[in-house]
Amino acid sequence: MTNTDSQSEVTHKQPRHIAIIMDGNNRWARGRGLSGGAGHRAGAEIARDVVHGCADRGIAYLTLFAFSSENWFRPDKEVKGLMALFLSVLKRYEIKQMHERNIRLQFIGKRDDFSPRLQKNMREVEELTRHNTGLVVTVAADYGGRWDIAQACQAVSRQVQSGHINVEDITPELLQNFVSMGDVPEPDLCIRTGGERRISNFLLWQFAYTELYFTDCYWPQFDETELQQAIDDFSRRKRRFGRESGSDEQEKIT
């Protein structure tokens, strides 16, 4: 599905692609006198439930912001805990369950700074689920939207230097082929939990026409009811993509 195709579908009953900024683990834990690690572990359980909830609803794509490029600047103890949790999640039985449900898992981001063991497990999960045709779950890890655009520009520059393309050939449509997830529809809906009203360097290129939904609910509290509320809110919106209000295109429903 091309970017142009996605923009011709102006009103959706249900989002095809949901992106989530999973925020509020630490604050949820502090409010209960728990460690930050406990908050992240609770958040991982919610992520699993949301994956299955999206699969149950027939959502085609789900992208989760698990670890940003900026998260490396958090306290060393917290970063180590997150890496250990990430590694344990990839080895859990839940991955096998997702595979049995025909769910595909993939990762976007730099990866280079992750341990060789973690990188190996990420590749194994991707390979295990590569041919699955159900819900596609993309986990953004060591990811930043500015990095994504920069690496796409670098890739295009190499193509120009090698003579494969001319500078005049560089268009938004061409660059789309080099950013992360360039081969899937851009997110229809971005959900951010935790009360903040910003996108925090997540999918800057891909969010050009994404509907934003913010909730004060902390991520470990984000249950089936919260997910459905976000989808219901989306279903009531009219997506114009810069067109005039009242045009025939706006009344299309998919």
Image: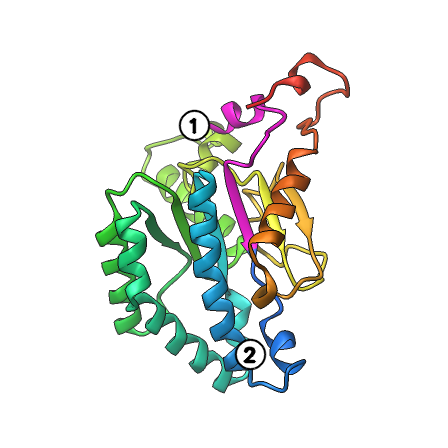
Q: Residues within 10 Å of mark 2 (few under 14, many from 20)?
A: few
Q: Which residues are magenta?
A: 1-20
- Give the side of residue 246 with respect to residue 94, left or right: right
Q: Position of residue 146 (x, y in %)?
A: 55, 54
Residue 67, compared with residue 41, is above or below; it is above
Q: Quadrant of residue 83?
A: bottom left
Q: Does the magenta run of residues contain 95?
A: no
Q: CA distance from mark 2 to mark 1?
A: 38 Å
Q: Does the magenta run of residues contain 2?
A: yes
Q: Which mark is residue 74?
A: 2
Q: Residue at x 26, y 50 (%)?
A: 100
The amino acid beneath tag 2 is Arg
- Give the side of residue 99 with respect to residue 11, left or right: left
Q: Position of residue 127 (x, y in %)?
A: 22, 53
Q: Residue at x 37, y 44 (%)?
A: 158
Q: Which mark is residue 72?
A: none
The C terminus is located in which quarter?
A: top right
Q: Residues within 10 Å of mark 1 (few under 14, many from 20)?
A: few
Q: Position of residue 128 (x, y in %)?
A: 22, 53
Q: Position of residue 46 (x, y in %)?
A: 50, 63
The residue that disc 1 covers is 1
Looking at the picture, tell me which residue is in the foreground, 249 or 41.
Answer: 41
Looking at the picture, tell me which residue is in the foreground, 114 or 169.
Answer: 114
